[in-house]
Amino acid sequence: MTVQSKKGQKKKKEPITPSLPAVLSSLARYLIEIKKYPYLSREEEEKIAKQYYEHGDLKAAENLITANLRLVVKIAYEYYRTGFKVMDLIQEGNIGLMQAVKEFNPYRGIRLATYASWWIKAYIQNFLIKNWSLVKIGTTQAQRKLFYKLEQERKRLEALGITPEIKLLSENLGVKEKEVTEMTKRLSGRDASLDAPIGHDEGATLLDFQSSHAEDYSTELANRETLTIFKDKLDDFVKTLTGKSLYIFERRIMSDEPMTLQEIGDEFGITRERVRQIEVDVVERLKEYIKQHAPELGVK
């Protein structure tokens, strides 16, 4: 493209150097900026992680963090319908990512992204708890589950073209219809007291989490999420058991008052040793099932 000079001579127009327009939102600029950091292969990540783990190399830590910034964005978007700005969620998630890098052990055989996901979610959830003004976020385990999962499940159903009715939501989330209805009402409100109890920890309130001990609570949240995953996989594993294996699993392995080997042997007319063999087999099958379907739990 050319322009006319005052003397009528044509001269080439200078090319415009691309830049990030000031009109772009901070989120858009941030997303563009983090794309310049490449993902790390498993081998690269392991090498860099060991460098930080063994020598405290801060440059290595920085590489691990920047390579996973897009993971934080992905997780933050899972919570964007909570009404908070995505950038606020990303900032909290980034803190969780940094903490994950600090705690990461590269010798455990799992990827940093898998391990960091729990820390990222924990910090975002902690942020939501401290800032969401609800009248009683939830006093039962089902209500706590709903606080984080209701909108996510509603969105998933809508994406499939399915109307997220109360009955369907309750079935999918494994809670009562009444609790779905109540939490829906709570999620539409914004008034809360710092004395409102949360979770199933006796006496815990929103005010308790306004302290500087965010890291301790984030660790607790991460552990809770790990436990939730394990329980879900455990329920799936039970469906694979039948006969003696199922009986031994329920009455001995998982029971608060387990039956003796002899009692189970008498029940089925088999020896104590045979019962023990079946028990060992069930435990090994459970370990293999968890390793295959939930490798992030790090079961050896």
Image (cartoon, helix red, strand yellow):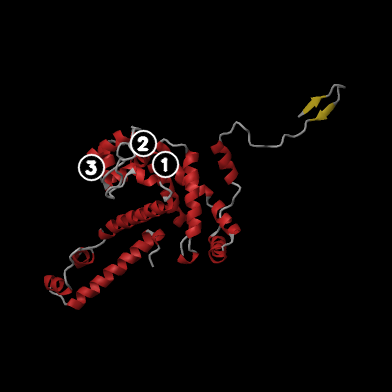
Do the numbered discs 3 and 2 sit on residues whose CB atoms are within 8 Å? Answer: no
Q: Secondary structure at mark 2?
A: loop
Q: CA distance from mark 3 to mark 1?
A: 23 Å
- The percent coordinates of residue 135 (x first, y second) are 30, 36
Q: Residue 172: tell me if it is visible.
A: no
- Report which quarter residue 292 is drawn in: bottom left
Q: CA distance from mark 1 to mark 2?
A: 16 Å
- Establish if 21 lies above or below 121: above
- Establish if 25 lies above or below 123: above
Q: What number is the disc on residue 133?
A: 2
Q: Which label's residue is closer to the chain start, 3 or 2?
A: 2
Q: Is residue 45 left or right of residue 263?
A: right
- The percent coordinates of residue 211 (x first, y second) are 41, 47
Q: Which label's residue is closer to the chain start, 3 or 1?
A: 1
Q: Amino acid at mark 1?
A: Tyr
Q: Is residue 296 left or right of residue 167?
A: right
Q: Which label's residue is closer to the chain start, 1 or 2?
A: 1
Give the number of the mark in front: 3 or 2: 2
Q: Secondary structure at mark 3?
A: loop
Q: Amino acid at mark 3?
A: Lys
Q: Dot 1 surroundings within 10 Å: few (below 14), some, or many (20 or more)?
A: many
What residue appears at the point 23 percent right and 42 percent down from the top-left corner? Answer: 176
* Residue closest to the eye, 15 or 197: 197
